Image (tube, grey):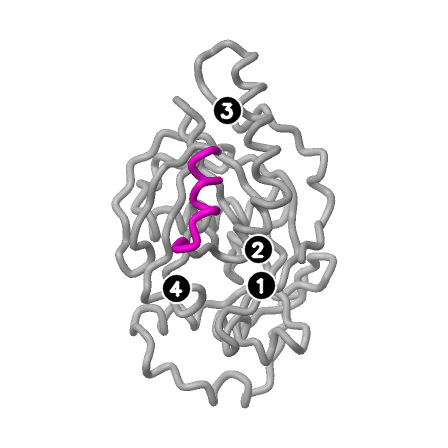
């Protein structure tokens, strides 16, 4: 795998003043994301700041990401989080359990069996939601597909990602990191649909896209197939991976 550092134009990153933002979130903007082409082929690295500036996104800069959907085995409810107001991109918005980026480090660059993405999920779930790392294993995450989407945040910032969709059914304990997550709750399909209908709720654009086209059919299939197993628990593993080789373009 190539590891050449691809520099973005300095004026499109270093000239953006972050003094008004939360110190910890500014620090995290220096993390190194994995740059990819439209085929999800890694070719370099860029800071989180560079990757999320719309000036660079408009120039085609694309990076790798993941979205975890964690369900409670007892009843199949989905754990949602509300992004903290301190977040630089998409603050104060409801979204799926955890959404972040594998970093340009050895463990998270591994592509076989999505090992790098799984490692990143195990790193970020404790960071954001306080889930103990010992409650998480790579095989807990069922990889379903990848999506390619672009979404502005506030004009200055945005997202342009190839996003790996991971389903998991786990009993976990949480202790929210208030710098990352302001609220979290388990919801049923009907309750999530009601949340979408409430105009006071704001949602991240990737979560809306996934919910619109993929989440509800997969969720219903998971509940149905798990019920037919007759074990009294919901399992993400009942879902097949028919679209694992695809990159779904979503707009």
The CA distance from mark 1 to mark 3 is 31 Å
Q: Residue 195 colored magenta?
A: yes
Which quadrant is home to the C terminus? bottom right
Q: Secondary structure at mark 2?
A: helix
Q: Closer to us: mark 3 or mark 4?
A: 4
Q: Secondary structure at mark 4?
A: loop
Numbered label attached to residue 235: 3
**Relative depth, front residue between 194 and 184:** 194
The CA distance from mark 2 to mark 4 is 28 Å
Counting residues from the N terminus, which is met first, the one under dot 2 or under dot 4?
Answer: 4
Q: Residue 144 colored magenta?
A: no
Q: Which residues are magenta?
A: 190-201
- Check disc 1 and report the residue beneath it: 34
**Relative depth, front residue between 44 and 38:** 38
Q: Residues within 10 Å of mark 4 (few under 14, many from 20)?
A: some
- Check disc 2 and report the residue beneath it: 109
Q: Is residue 151 left or right of residue 32?
A: right
Q: Residue at x 50, y 69 (%)?
A: 153
- Check disc 4 and report the residue beneath it: 91
């Amino acid at each position: 795998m190539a590891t050449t550092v691809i520099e973005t134009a300095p004026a499109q990153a270093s000239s953006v003043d972050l003094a008004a933002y939360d110190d910890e979130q500014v620090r995290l903007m220096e993390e190194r994301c994995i740059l990819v082409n439209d085929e999800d082929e890694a070719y370099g690295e860029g800071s989180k700041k560079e990757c999320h500036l719309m000036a660079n996104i408009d120039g085609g800069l694309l990076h790798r990401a993941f979205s975890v959907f964690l369900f409670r085995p007892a009843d199949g409810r989905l754990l949602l989080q509300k992004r903290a107001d301190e977040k630089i991109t998409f603050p104060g918005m409801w979204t799926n359990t955890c959404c972040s980026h594998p970093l340009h480090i050895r463990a998270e660059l591994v592509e076989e069996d999505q090992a790098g993405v799984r490692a990143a999920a195990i790193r970020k779930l404790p960071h954001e939601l306080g889930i103990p790392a010992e409650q998480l294993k790579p095989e807990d995450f069922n990889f379903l597909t990848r999506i390619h989407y672009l979404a502005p945040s506030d004009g200055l910032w945005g997202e342009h990602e190839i996003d790996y969709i991971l389903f998991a059914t786990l009993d976990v304990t949480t202790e929210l990191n208030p710098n990352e997550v302001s609220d979290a709750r388990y919801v049923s399909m009907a309750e999530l649909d009601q949340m979408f209908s409430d105009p006071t709720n704001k949602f991240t654009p990737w979560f809306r896209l996934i919910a619109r086209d993929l989440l509800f059919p997969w969720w219903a299939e998971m509940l149905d197939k798990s019920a037919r197993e007759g074990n009294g628990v919901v399992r993400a593993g009942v879902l097949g991976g028919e679209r694992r080789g695809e990159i779904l373009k979503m707009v």
